Amino acid sequence: MSGDFRARLRAALTGLAGMVALGLGVTAATAQGAAPSPDANNAAGANASGANASGANAWADPDLVRAAHAEGGSVTVYSSVNEQEALPFWKLFEDATKLKVEYVRGSDVVLIGRIAIEQRARQRSWDLLLSPAVGRLPRDFMQPIDLSEAKYLMPQARDPERRWYGVYANYDVPSYNSKLVNSSDLPKSYEEFLDHKEWAGRIAVEQTDVQWLAALFTHYGEARARKLIADIVSTLKPVIIDGHLALARAVAAGEYAVTLNNYLNLTLNMRLSGAPADYWGLDPVAVFFGSVAVNPLAPHPKTAQLAANFVLSPEAQHMLTTSGRLPVRPDVMPNPADAVTRLGQRKIIVVDFPGEEEKKWQRTFQDLFRPR
């Protein structure tokens, strides 16, 4: 990576020296020190039941609900969230509004490709995208929109141009099978992975972990990060896995002992289900968001606005925590409450780069983990 690119990346990433324990565990900060933001303090006055200053279901403005019904009474949601989690989530919206959700689930890659084709053809096919892949969309594929619930979000989860809003936070941390690895043997840095040659071939990483890779480059510097990863690849021979959920399940089943990295919430899901899976914190911890965006060609624009406001509401955010996802509202407690704070005082790097930059990082990932 060029020096200019590193400079631009550093400007796009917010490095936090530690965590501020306020609901989610992270608030706005700078490299000089962390401090709660005024928005976060205001949000703390609301409660997770949805009974904020405007009352329960404050997200469901009656005029907007009526306008949504006038559009036909349905909304089409594209998302990479699995149906087992998503359908009960969207039923909350349906029950509150009497509107129908047409849910289309696909992988991030498939959804972004489909949207690109549909936008070129000017097809009015989808209303809302809920996915970590929102950032890969061209800016003009996302309609600027004002949402009343957005003021309660942590500041990093609000796009300055109002084209996307964070819905849940993905924390990138290593994980392990607690039947195969003792917690006392866990590395205290990524360099210490090299001391565990017994893990060769029993360690895995997901093939699209570019946010984690970018955070490593920012934390260590490019030269040191490249050398560290090259040493890990040659010494431990990590297996490259397709899919973060598949990786979490494989570790829980004992197919692999350790991961270099995975989404914290997926390991939490395995742990909450009783599987012998757990995680720990190492510097750096990359954070990025699963976000929501509205289609500028939405066939149901008012319904899309209403649905987008719903996913930011305390009711929806609380529902997400029941699946182990980490909320972006400081007034909604994670499940379990120490999900983030148990990582300890770690360097948090918020990663947000557009699709073209992500492609560059994907090529770098492939070059490092699949050297010719």
Image (cartoon, rainbow, N blue to C red):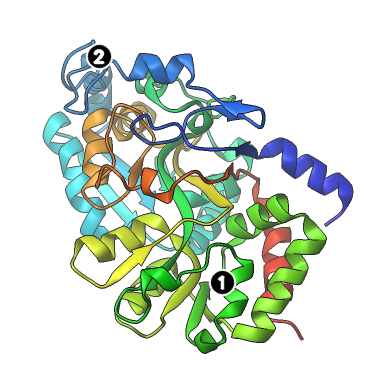
Residue 305, image x, y percentages: 37, 28
Which quarter of the picture shows residue 51?
A: top left
Q: Residue at x 63, y 39 (%)?
A: 15
The residue under label 1 is 207
**Residue 19 seen by the camera:** yes
Report the front residue among 113 and 341.
Answer: 341
The relative height of residue 275 versus residue 84 in the rendered view (above or below) is below
Residue 40, image x, y percentages: 41, 21
Mark 1: few/some/many CA within 10 Å (<14, 14-19, 20+): some
**Residue 126 seen by the camera:** no
The relative height of residue 245 versus residue 346 in the rendered view (above or below) is below
Task: Please tell me whether mark 2 sits on a helix, a strand or a loop.
Answer: helix
Report the front residue among 94 and 204.
Answer: 204
Q: What residue type is labelled 2?
A: Asp
Task: Please tell me whether mark 1 sits on a helix, a strand or a loop.
Answer: loop
Which quarter of the picture shows residue 50?
A: top left
Residue 231, image x, y percentages: 71, 78
Name of the residue lying farthest toward the top: 53
- Disc 2 and disc 1 in contact, CB within 8 angstroms: no
Which numbered disc, 2 or 1, marks the residue closer to the eye?
Answer: 1
> How far apart in space, not on screen, are marks 2 and 1 (Cα)?
45 Å
Report the front residue among 24 and 93.
Answer: 24
Residue 289, image x, y percentages: 48, 44
Q: Residue at x 31, y 74 (%)?
A: 178
Q: Which amino acid does label 1 sit on?
A: Gln
The relative height of residue 304 versus residue 209 in the rendered view (above or below) is above
Which badge, 2 or 1, comes first in the chain's sequence?
2
Horizontally, is 37 left or right of 365 in the view?
left
The residue under label 2 is 63
